Image (cartoon, rainbow, N blue to C red):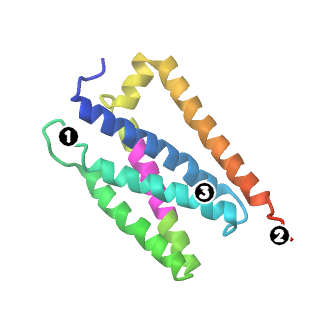
């Protein structure tokens, strides 16, 4: 059964989970998509970076049941540093460092996600056990809205402005 939490935690955890889900999706899109560096890559990358920062900052409001911090909070500090370093690197036109920092940030996110899945008392495994249809709908909504976003971004990349005479 799902544990009862204060309403503020529920909102914060929901925001955190939604941002983390989009981070997983948009990060994968940018890592797998070719070519890199175009307008679609930059726009999807910005969406990913913002969602990653939301994940990082909301994580500090989510505590263990006794009010403390755990290894996921240390990963949030590291992620903040690597994400910021990756953005700084591309701003300085250092593509190699940008690629390394962003790839590391993404795989840190994947590691955290797997760590959360491995603990049966966490919300996602509990949803999978007790509310599988709801979890399925949530996943479909996330994937659908992310797909629409990527398609929309791709369409924006294809539109050309015609100069007005």
Q: Tags 2 and 3 in contact by the CB under 8 Å rule?
A: no
How many discs appear?
Answer: 3
Helix, strand or loop at label 1? It is loop
Residue at far left of view:
66
Query: Up-down: is 46 above or below 59?
Result: below
Image location (x, y in percent) of residue 127: 41, 23
Q: Main secondary structure of the magenta part?
A: helix
Q: CA distance from mark 1 to mark 3?
A: 32 Å
Mark nearer the N terminus (2 vs 3) = 3
Q: Is residue 129 magenta?
A: no
Query: In the drawing, does residue 151 fall left or right of residue 72?
Result: right
Mark nearer the N terminus (1 vs 3) = 3
Helix, strand or loop at label 3? It is helix
Instruction: Determine the image quadrant of residue 74.
Output: bottom left
Image location (x, y in percent) of residue 21: 48, 42
Query: In the drawing, does residue 103 fall left or right of residue 17?
Result: right
- Disc number lying in front (2 or 3): 2
Image location (x, y in percent) of residue 106: 49, 57
Give the label on residue 163, or none.
Answer: 2
In the rendered structure, which segment of residues is drawn in magenta? 103-114
Determine the residue positioned at 48% across, 59% down: 49
Density class for disc 1 (Cα within 10 Å; few <14, some 14-19, many ≥20) is: few
- Disc number lying in front (2 or 1): 2
Is residue 97 shown to the viewer in this render? yes
In the rendered view of the protein, which quadrant contains the C terminus?
bottom right
| Residue that mark 1 sits on | 64
Query: Up-down: is 150 above or below 164?
Result: above
Q: Tags 2 and 1 in contact by the CB under 8 Å rule?
A: no
| Residue that mark 3 sits on | 44
Query: Up-down: is 4 above or below 35?
Result: above
* Front residue of 50 and 63: 50
């Amino acid at each position: 059964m799902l544990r009862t939490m204060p309403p503020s935690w529920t909102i914060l955890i929901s925001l955190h989970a939604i941002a983390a889900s989009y981070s997983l999706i948009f990060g994968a899109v940018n890592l797998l998509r070719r070519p890199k560096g175009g307008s679609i890559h930059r726009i999807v990358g910005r969406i990913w970076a913002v969602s990653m920062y939301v994940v990082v900052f909301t994580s500090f409001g989510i505590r263990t049941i006794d009010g403390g911090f755990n290894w996921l909070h240390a990963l949030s500090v590291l992620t903040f540093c690597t994400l910021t370093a990756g953005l700084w690197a591309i701003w300085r036109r250092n593509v190699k460092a940008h690629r390394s920092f962003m790839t590391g940030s993404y795989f840190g996110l994947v590691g955290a996600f797997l760590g959360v899945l491995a603990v049966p008392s966490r919300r996602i495994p509990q949803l999978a056990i007790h509310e599988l249809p709801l979890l399925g709908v949530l996943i479909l909504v996330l994937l659908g809205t992310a797909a629409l976003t990527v398609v929309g971004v791709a369409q924006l990349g294809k539109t050309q402005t015609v100069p007005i005479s």
